[in-house]
Image: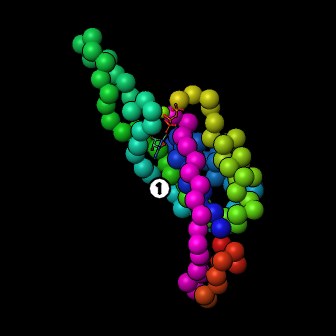
Amino acid sequence: MTKIEAIIQPNKVSEVREALEAAGVTGLTLSEVQGHGRQKGHSQVYRGNEYTVDLIPKVKIELVVAESRTEELIGVISAAAQTGKVGDGKIFISDVRETVRIRNGDRGDLAL
Ligand SMILES: Nc1ncnc2c1ncn2[C@@H]1O[C@H](COP(=O)(O)OP(=O)(O)OP(=O)(O)O)[C@@H](O)[C@H]1O
Ligand SMILES: [Mg+2]
């Protein structure tokens, strides 16, 4: 199993969720987060000097999927979230050792 963590622009959440739904994803977790990438937040000019301020609000979508679906779903998320401008976000992929459905003890892919 694979965990896909996608950090995206908040205004892309609906599009990404609809695309994931259409792709048959059964579960996900969404959090409002703050962060920065290479631009270190907004660059703002104040009294002639450029300052770096703040963390930018983003949304993190986490989903654990069968390993065989990983590349396909990276494509689905990227296509829905991309504008081509800086700050579009990032996708992190990691291995997941086990999943347990608490209700009935299902394990692995069966529990996704
Ligand atoms: N290396 C990282 N580790 C953890 N979170 C990151 C990392 N890089 C980016 N993020 C998260 O992703 C969000 C969006 O990053 P962003 O798309 O600006 O990345 P970038 O590398 O600056 O690319 P771009 O040049 O396209 O803006 C950040 O606000 C932060 O929450
Ligand atoms: Mg950036």
**109, above or below 51, in the image:** below
- Residue 103 in sight from this viewpoint: yes
Q: Is residue 20 left or right of residue 51?
A: right
Taking the spot 39% from the left edge, 33% from the top edge, the residue there is 40
Relative side of 46 to 36, left or right: left
Q: Residues within 10 Å of mark 1 (few under 14, many from 20)?
A: few
Q: Give the residue at mark 1.
A: 31
Cβ of disc 1 within 8 Å of ligand 1? no
| Residue closest to the far left | 47
- On the rendered image, what quadrant is the N terminus found in? bottom right
Direction from residue 51 to residue 92 in the image, left or right: right
Decide: is 24 above or below 111. Answer: above
Q: Is residue 21 magenta?
A: no
Q: Give the x, y percent position of residue 81.
A: 62, 41
In the displayed structure, 87 sits above or below 73; it is above
Residue 41, horizontal then vertical, whole percent: 39, 33
Relative image position of residue 103 (x, y in whole percent): 58, 86
**Disc 1 element:** strand
The correct choice, above or below, for 100 with respect to 89 in the image is below
Residue 95 located within the stretch drawn in magenta: yes
Magenta residues, start to end: 87-103
Location of residue 19 in the rendering, given as x and y in whole percent from the top left corner = 70, 50
Q: Is residue 18 visible?
A: no
